[in-house]
Image: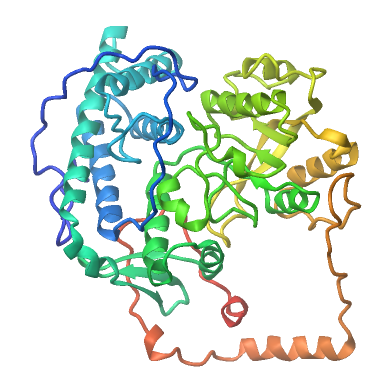
Amino acid sequence: QQQQQQQVPRGFPSPTSSPLKSPPQMSPPHSGSSPLGVGLGHQHLPPRGPLSPEHPALTVYRHQQLQALLGRVAATTPLTGSMIANLISKWILRSSHFVAPHVDPVIPSWSDYSVLVGFFQRQLIHLHAATPIPTAKNMEAVKNIGTAVANICQEFARAVKEFKATLTVAATDEQNNVRLGQSPNGQAYIAWTGRGQHTIAAESAALISLRSLYIGPPELFLTSAFALLQRYATYRSLNPLEVRLPGPAVAYLKQIGVTGQALADPFEAGGLPYCSLFSDVDGLFSALQPYGKEGGGGELQLGSSCVILPPCEPTLAAAYARRALDGMQNRDGRTYWLVLPQACFRAHREISKHDLRTLDSRLQEGRPGVRAVQVLSSTFFSYPGPPGNTEAGVRSRAIVVVMGAPNGAVTAANVAEFVNFIRAGRKGAPPKPVPPPQGYAAVSSPRPVQPTQPLLQQQQQQQQQQQQPQPVMAPALQQPAMQPAYQPAFTQQPQQPQQQQQ
């Protein structure tokens, strides 16, 4: 209730200004079944039109609506905040791989009302079996809660849709009111001043990485970066369970010839082609459609070898594995590095090789095309986020499967080296140059230069200069310290003086 009563910034409608409308008429269910378990048959992807940056006002307003939605559900249902956030994050994952039209990519809003209700009801029934929902005495009460959540989500999604319709051509000028600044403590930020002051922290390393991936109009880079950072901050405010491979492991795979990642974001691309969840905003930063999306995703553009770390959700993990197995059976000539954390399985015990068959019966050691299977008792996965904030992570049991690998493209030594990197985590040593496998071109890597005595003296002089007071910033960077419009999901740390000088 306190979240609902927050003061709405100037220029935005109130999240609770409109009463709850009656739900739309239920449409008949589609025939067939979906590999994602949402009850729709096979459909074809609509053609992808030209990408344009999302309006900053829409990204800010969507975040405000999501926070108000969480408060409304918590106030009107017996669900806890973590339960609601888990439901919405699962919907975001499903909808990004599902071709059924939706009103909004973040707020649950499938246009087919019956599919949306069925999704929440099934999720709550599964949740209730593991952790009983307070005051829900039977399955009918659980279903009623699912219907109520769907109705609330539909209301807030319509509010976002109506607000988006007000952003006409006349709003183009305020869309471009985005600038880059730096606070007195050295924290870089992107500020949008179209309707009040809205800022979001942005590490310099992240901006440099995003700039190298950006393919949109040059004058709209900051607008696109603001929308991208805001989208991921909104998504990660739900605390979804998502992990990434440690940087040294990705660097090693790239060195031995891996040409793409099945799931990454612009901050963790690692210089490889990648598929992402939010292709509407990530697409401006060279992202492909989600891997394994119904009707075809970006997997065909990942090259001859790709690493697959699927979402930590069993249904989608099975869909990722199935798409790779289908490609292998069709003799696509690719090599697949499949990494499956414990959360990709439904087992409530430590996973083993036998659990692979729960994702797909063809995914077993000794089957045609399955070159190697290794179970790891302790594997380090980093939490995603912009560069500079990726030391944090989690250790989990995992299974590594190598499939395809024609003509001996992957050796046992390659698999062992990769396993060592994901065991060591980000703090492991950088990958050493290794002889390229058969079928791959040699990777040129310059030798490390040993510092000479004059060079060591120069480094000591630079360190002494850094300890002296820094010069006053230019007037363009003398911005007052401002609080962001919300607390970002990833907390940025101030850069060290040496990083600022670089």
- As displayed, is residue 10 above or below residue 141? below
- Which image quarter: residue 176? bottom left
Q: How many marks?
A: 0
At x 29%, y 60%, the residue is 56
- As displayed, is residue 379 above or below residue 231? above
Of residue 386 and residue 212, the one placed in the foreground of this image is 212
Quarter of the image with the C terminus is bottom right
Q: Position of residue 9 (x, y in %)?
A: 18, 59
At x 70%, y 16%, the residue is 362
Figure colour scheme: rainbow
- As displayed, is residue 161 above or below residue 404? below
- Which image quarter: residue 131? top left
Residue 286 relative to residue 415: left or right:
left
Q: Position of residue 233 (x, y in %)?
A: 41, 52
At x 37%, y 48%, the residue is 234
State whether residue 245 appears in this view. Answer: no
Q: Position of residue 214 (x, y in %)?
A: 50, 63
Of residue 186 and residue 246, the one placed in the foreground of this image is 246
